[in-house]
Amino acid sequence: MSSNKVSIFLTGATGYVGGSVLQRLLDHPKAGTFDISVIVRNAEKAKILKSKFGVNAVVGTHQDLDKLEALAENAHIAFHCADSDDLPAAKAILSGLKKRHAKLGDLPILIHTSGVGVLTDEATSTGLFATETIYSDLDVEQLKSIPPTALHREVDLAIMEADEQGDIRAHIVLPATIYGLAQGSLFDAGVSNPHSIQIPSLIKAALQRKQAGMVGQGKAIWPDVHIDDVADLYALLLDAVLSHPATIGHGWEGFYFAENGEHSWYQVQRAIGEALVRRGITQDPEPTPFTTEELAKYFGSESVGRYYSGSNARCRAERSRSIGWKPRYTTEDLLKSVESEMAVVLKQQS
Ligand SMILES: NC(=O)c1ccc[n+]([C@@H]2O[C@H](COP(=O)([O-])OP(=O)(O)OC[C@H]3O[C@@H](n4cnc5c(N)ncnc54)[C@H](OP(=O)(O)O)[C@@H]3O)[C@@H](O)[C@H]2O)c1
């Protein structure tokens, strides 16, 4: 490892978000000055990452806490893109970064992936109303008021603690529903997953029941964001921490929502229903309510089903825009993307 290179560690290289961020690192004008390490559990993909992309790919899982810790300790910048909820893995990364700080005096930077799921509330995930509470990533008191029991929150709070102790500078990206096919050489090479989770799972359920479904009346609202715009936000944060780390918001002033519009779940399900009609799978594009049994059958459990399309999460990415983020895709693009997402799901199923 050349000492004058910027050492970067990234998790989730084979995933949708992490693959998109790694792609931005590889395509970055300063890519030649980066020394990138990743941890992946597929040995074949590790080989390709090394030989084709010049990435130091260590084979391991997030249960290999010693490997995570050592890789983080070797990095000035860590992107944790794999898992918003794995507390032991996050703690191992934090521990490595803290050790680095203690040994070298370097103030390491963590850019972590959480999600707007942190704004949801299981008790009100009924699909019967749209919440009026809208969070801003500039409103620190409002962000602090999110309960510790919220989704992703345990990990986010552990990261805030490390930032407050002065061991790291932490930045947390909270993407909305991400949509769109991720693109680039990592995806072409079959290394990284080009597909998102939430919308494809709704499409799969609709295909199985031959009718679009919804939780309650589909009135709950979520924000949305295209994968390219998400990757742009990470790239912008990277450029900011490389060029002026002391002035870019971190800790409680380092929450960055990624959203560029809002949809009701009815709108998404209706778009899915119309795509079913175009394929002759049903004649009726109107979504019908999922039964409790259907939620368990299609989404693994009733609560996951309610979360996926019955929960509310509303926010404004004001801090993200304040650092120059300019998302290009809108909710209209999300609704249009349902058509191509359904084509992909059908192709996979055939
Ligand atoms: N997609 C969205 O709409 C969205 C929105 C907001 C937040 N998020 C959050 O972002 C995170 C990543 O999501 P994603 O869409 O990128 O998911 P994904 O495509 O499934 O990627 C997950 C990545 O994590 C890796 N991974 C998971 N568990 C691992 C383990 N135990 N050991 C080693 N590697 C492990 C996977 O490796 P393998 O390839 O080996 O499986 C993969 O590289 C999630 O926590 C999600 O909640 C996603």
Image (cartoon, helix red, strand yellow):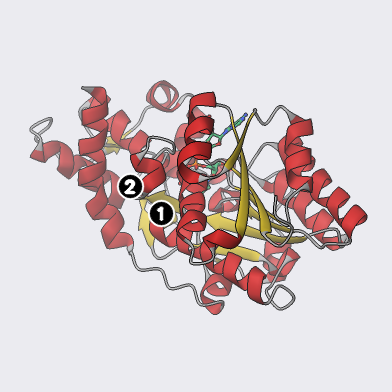
Above-or-below relation of 93 to 348: below
For residue 129, which numbered disc appears in the image?
A: none
**Nearest the camera: 43 or 350?**
43
For residue 227, which numbered disc appears in the image?
A: 1
Above-or-below relation of 283 to 33: above
Q: Position of residue 313 (x, y in %)?
A: 51, 55
Q: Position of residue 163 (x, y in %)?
A: 81, 60
The answer to whether the residue bearing label 1 lies less than 8 angstroms from the nearest atom of ligand 1 is yes
Q: Residues within 10 Å of mark 2 (few under 14, many from 20)?
A: some
Above-or-below relation of 147 to 299: below
Is residue 193 visible to the viewer in this orientation of the structure?
A: yes
Q: Which callout, 1 or 2, points at the residue further toward the start of the chain?
A: 2
The amino acid beneath tag 2 is Leu
Residue for point 80% across, 50% down: 97
**Nearest the camera: 342 or 10?**
10
Q: Is residue 35 left or right of residue 216?
A: right
Is residue 220 visible to the viewer in this orientation of the structure?
A: no
**Nearest the camera: 281 or 60?**
60
Judging by the rendered image, the residue that carries numbered circle 2 is: 181
Disc 1 + disc 2, Cβ < 8 Å: yes
Q: Is residue 297 left or right of residue 303?
A: left
Residue for point 43% across, 28% down: 299
Q: Is residue 220 left or right of residue 214?
A: right
**Nearest the camera: 273 or 343?**
343
Q: Position of residue 224 (x, y in %)?
A: 41, 57
The amino acid beneath tag 1 is Ile
